[in-house]
Structures are given as structure tokens and as C-alpha cells.
Amino acid sequence: MPRRYLASFVAALLLAPWLAVGSASPARAFCLEITVAISVHCGGQGHNTITDRALHFLSPGVRSHIKNANRAQDIDAGGRPELHFTNCLFTRSTNYIRSQYDQVVGAISPPTSIALTDGLAAAGRWGQLLHPVQDFYPHSPWVDPRPVGLGFGTTYPQRLLDSGLGNWRLLGAYEKLIPADPVNSDIVTVQGNPWGVIELPRGPSGNPKSAVPNVWPFYADRQRGLMTSSAAPFTNGDGQCPPAGRGSFGSDVLGTTCIDKESVCIRHGGRECHSLILRTPIFDNCLQHDVDTRFGWKPAFDSAVAQTEHEWCRLLHMTRDRRAYNAVSIPMALWVAPNTTPHPAGTPCAPEHKRDIDLSLTIEVESARGSPNSPIFDPTNLVFVAYTGDFRQSVRTHVVTGRKTTRSLDVCINRDDTLVATLWGWLDQGYSSLLGGGDNSYDPWEPVLGGMTKSFAGPNLSIEEEWRNADLRLKLKIEPDLSNDCPNQ
């Protein structure tokens, strides 16, 4: 049956093993940015740049650790296509992201005294899960203009594959992605052989003219399918783009399972993608937007940046909901670099004009761990942060001292906001710059002083308290500023 098939009748045939005498190109994630003294490959196009642009407000050491863990997925995970969001493995890819998030949030644990937090493990696992999160966009037709793709690459804020604030949604086979959207409620995940009919729209020559297959389930009307590109390895059922479960049975010259007149899957690369004869948008595209010479790279890159910015906001909300404010204060206070604002535009954590109450905060902080002039102790860094419980407003001050220090800050909140105040410290290691970190900003391998966090519910905030633990002391005074200099709009 050319160009379409009934999986319910031929599933057994399609799932039979095939002799692989050729294979698709292994998936690469945007591109592998490696820096020794200078960038030696695809500088400014890959995962490092995406992470730097999206998470520029994180300290150099935290960001370096996240990028190293992200990049290692390309080197260490070549046999796991779900880590590159290829081969239509929606369930396995989203399950991996979900399980990683469980471990990330579980690792963010406040220490009770001077110690290494589990920030090194948390930042590393978060970097690992960001790899498939970013890879989805160059390996799918999500951003491609219609009719080649779904056309989600030109909107702002960008439409994301997952825009929730809890853990990622576990996607199943032929599941509706956006059921509440009246325009796009017909988009389903393509994973495995459907109980129905599926085919790519094709031109008179039989070549595909769209990377969005038509799906006719036995139980529903026509739907649009979302696939990801097919890449080696295909063995053991890794290839779930129809015809699913088959390896590549021909060479690039004799034919393959993808981009031919019988298949729905589209290969990630391969000689067909560079053919001078088959010059169509599909063959130019090949669901491979990895570098800036590829069709669709810019919208894929921008969408990956937007999704990564959203993941920061998700991390804060998940940590708050599962571990409370004393845990979420670790990324909010320690991970964020001095003099930056951790509120990415276009996300649910974007800055909001708070206008009801102008608060004046006076803090007196002190560390019991010595001073920068002491030869026994590393310099002590203290950071005080006040932020709203919705993560849309924050103020911070950073002190490099072991002596008593007084600072004043102002913050505007709404009457129904929760205000969170937190103080943390760490011992600055002089060798941090050799590991990608920076002096006077927290690096995830540095010893952390036990932190203190308290939350206050508005609107009546007139507070004077003193907090102590084995490492730190904080005297905090909060009082409304009657001049109310909050913005009017």
C-alpha cells in the first residue's frame, strides 16, 4: 500500500528485524562547542551559547558546571536518542526530563553548618536535562513555517513544548499536545505505528512537501502529527517514527527507511539532505537545525533559549512547592551572580510592577568565620536577598567581609504577596577561576555557610527580628516607606 499503511494490520511486519547496511547520521545537538584557549568548533551557535544567553544572571561557576553537564550528553549519550529528543521517543524523552527534575529538586538541600551543599549535583543534573529540552527545537518541525512545519517559530513569547510550572508532562503516543487551543487542538505526538493511517503530504513526484504528517486514527478525524527526526541507533525499537521498530535496511544510494515513498520518518542528516537533485524544503530541512548554515536554525535557537529561561522559573516553582522557601533560596541567593536580576522576560518569573507597598529593609549581617584579612580562613562572602513568593521581584546585596556590615534596600510588593528574606554565605576559593568560576561569586564546589530564610505575609509588614545560626547573624528591620516610591505603572 504505497505512501500509507494500516498499522493495525501490518504492525507485526513493520516491527520485524531488518538487516542494517546503512544508517542515519547520529543526532548532534545544535553543535558541540568546545573551548580550550579559543572556541574551536561552531562558536556562538550551540548549547553553551544558548545556556549563557538564557541564564546570564547565574554565577560563572554555576553556569560553567551546567554547560559542562549539558555538553557531556553529546559525548556520552550517543546510544540514547531520547537524550537528543530524536526518533519520536516522546515518552522516553519526557520521562528522562521528569526523573532528572525529581533528582535536581531532591538535591537542593540546605546545610545546617559549614559544608558543601548538594548544589554541585543539582546544577549538574539540571544541565543534563537541559540538553534534550534544548534539542527538541532543532530536531522537530515545531519552528518551521507552514506548510513544512507547525509554524511556532515566529511568535513572542515563543510557544513552548512545555510551558507548565510543575514537572514536565509525560507525553504518550498519539496524545494531543494542546487540547485547549481551538486552532491547534488537532496536533498529536507521532510515536510508533498508529491504529489508523498516517502519511506525509506529498507532491506530484511523490516526494514529501511537509514534515507534518496527516494522521487518521480509526476513532477520530484527521489530525496533524508532530514528529522528531530519525537518527542512529535504530536498534531494539529505538526508531519510533513510522515505520517504527525498523532499522535502516539500505544504503544512502540504494534507499533507507526515511525520506522515501513508503516512510513517514525524516532522517537527521544523510546524503539525501544534501542532494542536488532532491531540492525541496523537506530535503533542505531534514529536521536538523543544528548550526547557522541549516534551514531554521535561528528560530530553533531562539526557542531553545526561551525554553531554557522558562526552565529556570520552573525550577524555582518546583523547589518551592516540594521543598519550601528555605530550599528555593539556594538557587535564588547562591546561584545568582552579584548585580544581576534573575527574572527572565517572557516567563512567569518576569518582573512585575509591584505598586501597593514600598518597604524599607535595613540589615545588619555578620559572619562567625573570620575576615578576609585572616590567613586561616578563605574570604567570606555574604548575600542577602528579599524576593516575592511568585519570584517576580527581588532585591539583593552582596558583602565580602567577615565583619559586621549594615545595608539598606527598598522593595515594592503587592498586598497579597509573600515576602521572603534569606541570608547565605560561602567561603571563596582562590582556585575557582581555574574551574570556570569567578572570585566573589558562588561556585558550586565552594563550602557554604548555613543559610537562614523566613517568609512574611503582607500587607502589615512592620518587623524587627534577629536570626542566628552557627555561621551567620542577621538583624532585619522591615518597615513601610510612607513616601511610597513604587512605580505607578
Image: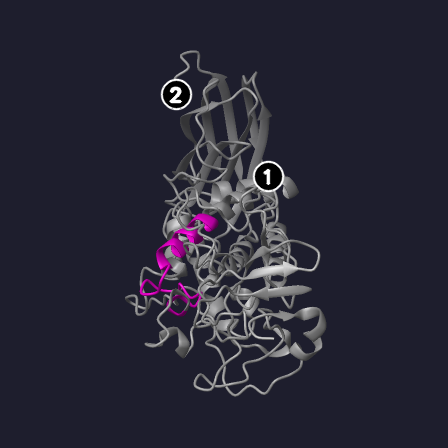
Magenta stretch: includes residue 295 = yes
Horizontal side of residue 246 vs 379, given as left or right: right
Of residues 24 and 108, the one nearer the viewer is 24
The residue beneath circle 1 is 326
Find residue 244 and report its image quarter: bottom right
Mark 2 residue type: Pro
237 left or right of 288 in image = right
Q: Quadrant of the C terminus?
A: top left
Name the residue rendered at 47%, 35% in the picture: 384
Residue 30 horizontal/vertical position (percent): 40, 64
Up-down: is 6 above or below 324? below
Magenta-drawn stretch contains 361: no
Determine whether, in the image, residue 108 is placed left or right of residue 439.
Answer: right
Q: Amino acid at mark 1?
A: Asn
On the image, the x and y values in percent for residue 456 come to 58, 25
Q: Quadrant of residue 329?
A: top right
